[in-house]
Amino acid sequence: ATVIDLASSTEDIVSEQPVIALFAKIFDVSPDKAYLIAIPKISENGKKMAELYNIQVIEAKNQKEAVKALKDKLLRNKK
């Protein structure tokens, strides 16, 4: 199973709060992979927490870029 979550901010940076929320979902579901899409980018604390919880972060400027980056990552991890 794979868990994907999206967090966006009208500010320049997404806080670590979505990482904590995704971790709770991971705890419930126990997926093989977890991805957090951050638009436009995630805070340093968020990156550190994501790494600790084994969540892969995808940073993107917009929705179109996010979809492309996620697709690329999913295809790369299938191999």
Image (cartoon, grey):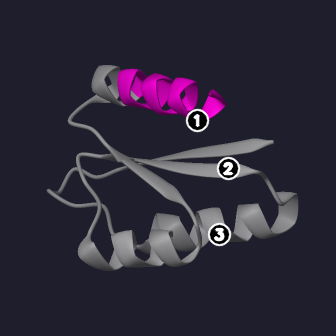
**Chain part drawn in magenta:** 67-79
Q: Residues within 10 Å of mark 1 (few under 14, many from 20)?
A: few
Residue 28 position, x and y percent, is: 85, 65
Q: Amino acid at mark 3?
A: Phe
The residue that appears at 32% across and 19% down in the rendered structure is 64
Q: Amino acid at mark 2?
A: Lys
Q: Residues within 10 Å of mark 3 (few under 14, many from 20)?
A: some
Vertical order, 72 against 55 (above or below): above
The local secondary structure at tag 2 comes to strand
Which residue has dot 1 on it? 77
Does residue 74 appear left or right of residue 69 in this picture?
A: right
Instruction: Decide which of 8, 50 is in the foreground and name it.
Output: 50
The local secondary structure at tag 1 comes to helix
Q: Are marks 3 and 1 in contact (CB under 8 Å)?
A: no
Which residue has dot 2 on it? 33
Residue 58 position, x and y percent, is: 38, 45
Q: Main secondary structure of the magenta part?
A: helix
Sequence-first disc among 3 and 1: 3
The residue that appears at 74% across and 62% down in the rendered structure is 26
**In which quadrant of the rendered view does residue 46 lie?**
bottom left
Could you say which disc has been placed on residue 23 in the image?
3
Sequence-first disc among 1 and 2: 2
The residue that appears at 52% across and 78% down in the rendered structure is 52
Q: Amino acid at mark 1?
A: Asn
Vertical order, 19 against 62 (above or below): below
Vertical order, 55 against 48 (above or below): above
The local secondary structure at tag 3 comes to helix
- Nearer to us of marks 3 and 1 is 1
Sequence-first disc among 2 and 3: 3
Q: Are marks 1 and 2 in contact (CB under 8 Å)?
A: yes
